[in-house]
Image (tube, rainbow, N blue to C red):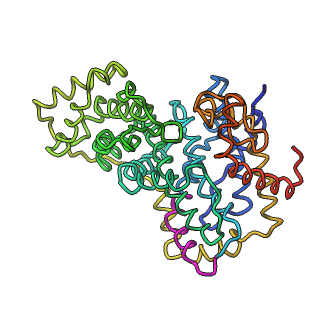
Amino acid sequence: MDTSVILPFEAEGFVQSLEAFSLKEVGSERWFRQHAHIEKLNMQAILNASAVHDEFVKELLVSYGKIPVLVHEMILVQVWKQKVFPILCQLEDFNPKDTFPLYMVIHHEATIINLLETIMYHKDSCEAAGDSVLDLVDYCHRKLTLLVSKATREAATAQDQRNPKGKAVASSADLMSALQMQSAAGEFEISQKAVSVLRFITDHTESISVIKRMMCTHNMPCVLVQLIVCCPWSRCKDGEVEKYINGRWQKIPVDDHLKMTKLDGQVWISLYNLLLNEDCQRNYDFNNFNKNQLLKLRGFMTEVLIDQLPNLVELQRYLAHLTVTDPAPPKKELILEQIPEIWNHIVRQNSGKWKAIAKYQVKETFSPSESELKLLAERLYQVYNFDVMESLLPEKPKCGSCGKEAAKRCSRCQGEWYCHRECQVKHWSKHKRACQLITEVTGKIQRDLHVNI
């Protein structure tokens, strides 16, 4: 079955049309059109990468020099979420009937970091990003710092507990607070993607400015050590170990407690790249604090870990050598360094205008009429093809009753999977209410959009 989202000539048109927006334009009709294009590019890039096909989305983004535009748009939404969104939530005269447009703006950042995670694996993507790699390093540092912080991890846990099955919020008065909770929980997922993007930057960069930004400005080795120590994607709940894998918390069997997750691997490889790179070593200040932080890693470098990632033997030797040596401090040389510009430019351009932008967007952008909302929903409905979405799932669906691999789903709501008829019957008492809600909502959308399925 052909599960392509877009053909190469369509992707070329989408890539060519990518442009940088102003903060005021976030959520506008033109902005949403580009959002739909980026969603399709993201899905196609993932399909190509997973099937080891010709990665034409990556090639087009590199050849047309559009990766800096993606970085700009991602940081633009990050600024919007920090500066404008909180004001929107506090405006007394803003009582939206539907927060769908707001949700899509919040989700936009996740879409772009997903796309960047897919394409930055390749060295030519890192090179094509040009000076925006510095902005990307700053972005990753902000996200990794959030990932280490207690607040972000609690937000992800709270979302998991309060809304475990993605149930609809009953009261319209709670829509904005629910949206704020979803935004905070989404930061956890976005921050984990930033770990992978940073790892790819450490794989490929040869720029002294980027190296200095990571080693001197942000002290990225110590941030990564802190991620190893606190391991925010692992937790103990009700006496059982759970790890955040493929977008959800999963119980881990006792035999797999020491098994490395993808995120563990990304952090260790980043540390390996930074600490064993000669340019990084020359530019890093191995003072007592930094040295003591790095030596904490030795306690985690067990035989089980090294069996899973054999290259860490070299890092283990390096840390053993570091215990008995005091590397010379970096030389103070006059070097002309590039500096990141995107975040500072957006903030400087809109400083003092945050409330005015929020009020403008309430009036012009986030209070759509019924017809505008239907048009937006119809456009996005065309973006998300169910066959394609299923092919993007990182693992096979699981039975809603017993948890085994499932091949059939509820014929009524299409939202729950089962391995056998017996499991479906057994699970019906729990699934009945959710099934009714999903069926009612889907039916309403189809009637509104005149879509025949």
- For the point 35% across and 46% down, which residue is it? 213
Name the residue furthest left: 324
Residue 80 within the magenta-colored segment of the rendering? yes
Residue 77 image position (x, y, % from top left): 56, 58
Please tell me which residue lies in front, 105 or 165.
165
Q: Which residues are magenta?
A: 77-94
Compared to residue 453, the image places residue 35 above or below, namely below
Q: Which image quadrant for residue 12? A: top right
Residue 367 within the magenta-colored segment of the rendering? no
Residue 382 image position (x, y, % from top left): 79, 46
Q: Which image quadrant for residue 155? A: bottom left
Please state if 393 lies on the left or on the right of 256 as rendered. Answer: right
Please state if 122 lies on the left or on the right of 327 as rendered. Answer: right
The quadrant the C terminus occupies is top right
- For the point 57% across and 35% down, which residue is it? 119
- For the point 38% across and 24% down, which residue is it? 255
Please tell me which residue lies in front, 170 or 258.
170
Residue 93 image position (x, y, % from top left): 63, 81
Residue 24 image position (x, y, % from top left): 62, 68
Q: Which image quadrant for residue 235? A: top left
Is residue 209 shown to the viewer in this render? no
- For the point 78% across and 25% down, which residue is it? 1
Compared to residue 140, the image places residue 117 above or below, namely above
Is residue 249 shown to the viewer in this render? yes
